[in-house]
Amino acid sequence: MLSVCVFASGRGSNFQALLDQIDQGKVDAQVVLVISNKSSAGALEIARKRGIPALHISDVHFSSTQEYVERLLALLQEHGVGLIVLAGYLKMVPSEVITRYRHRIINIHPALLPSFGGKGLYGHFVHEAVLAYGCKVSGATVHIVDIEYDTGPPIVQKCVPVHDDDTPDTLAVRVLQVEHEILPQVVHLFAQNRVVVSGHHVRILPERREEI
Ligand code: GRF
């Protein structure tokens, strides 16, 4: 079974959505480790309540970047992690980790990339920018993580309408609903080995039917 490590900085609703889908048997994976750069992250609390190892790890706890990277890599290996899910993780993942887990790290972004992505565009800033531009649609993107912010190839994207009377908060609620749908969906695709990355393109292989 696919072993997942979730990196999260915030309340952890995407992590919770993933756990819910796993519980319902819709995602054939297990979360074996949660890492947060914030000690107060809700995601850590959710994990601890379920007995999932949950660690507060930040580069500032280490005397060098190398030590930090080595600790991360050791933990990922110890827990047999096959997929890293960034679910509202607001820190850059070290490039050594990205290289080691090439095409095995995914991120959820609350907009339709490549629009409204990149450094500084996270959380409510994204929704403010979408509304300021006057967009008629927004949505969420799950993409492969590479060494820049939000530039890796999209795996699944889903749209939502933008309403004339939307505020960043009302739009965020609508987008979050689709985040909660597509993030677990993509984890399941990885669990089924159906994600193929070539260059900047991701192909989703068709579901394999059981032989009768
Ligand atoms: C989500 O909107 C995600 O797309 C963004 O941060 C938010 C995290 O929410 N990057 P949660 O912590 O999963 O509730």
Image: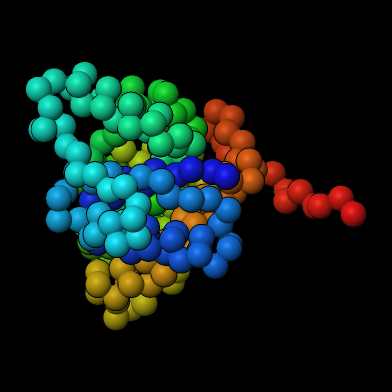
Q: Is residue 109 visible in this depiction of the protein?
A: no
Quadrant occupied by the C terminus: bottom right
Percent position (x, y) of residue 96? 33, 22
When asked about the image quadrant of residue 70, the answer is top left
Percent position (x, y) of residue 60? 10, 33
| Extreme-right residue of the structure | 212
Left or right position of 5 against 126: right
Percent position (x, y) of residue 89? 28, 47
When asked about the image quadrant of residue 180, the answer is bottom left
Residue shown at 14% from the left, 50% from the top: 39
Residue shown at 58% from the left, 63% from the top: 25
Name the image colouring.
rainbow
Left or right position of 204 against 85: right
Which one is nearer the viewer's eye here, 160 or 12?
12
Q: Is residue 19 above or below residue 151?
A: below
Quadrant occupied by the N terminus: top right
Q: Is residue 207 visible in this depiction of the protein?
A: yes
| Extreme-bottom residue of the structure | 165
When asked about the image quadrant of residue 161, the answer is bottom left
Residue shown at 44% from the left, 61% from the top: 19
Percent position (x, y) of residue 87? 34, 51
Which one is nearer the viewer's eye here, 94 or 41?
41
Residue shown at 25% from the left, 69% from the top: 168
Which one is nearer the viewer's eye here, 93 or 20?
20
Q: Is residue 18 above or below residue 200?
A: below
| Extreme-front residue of the structure | 51
Q: How many marks?
A: 0
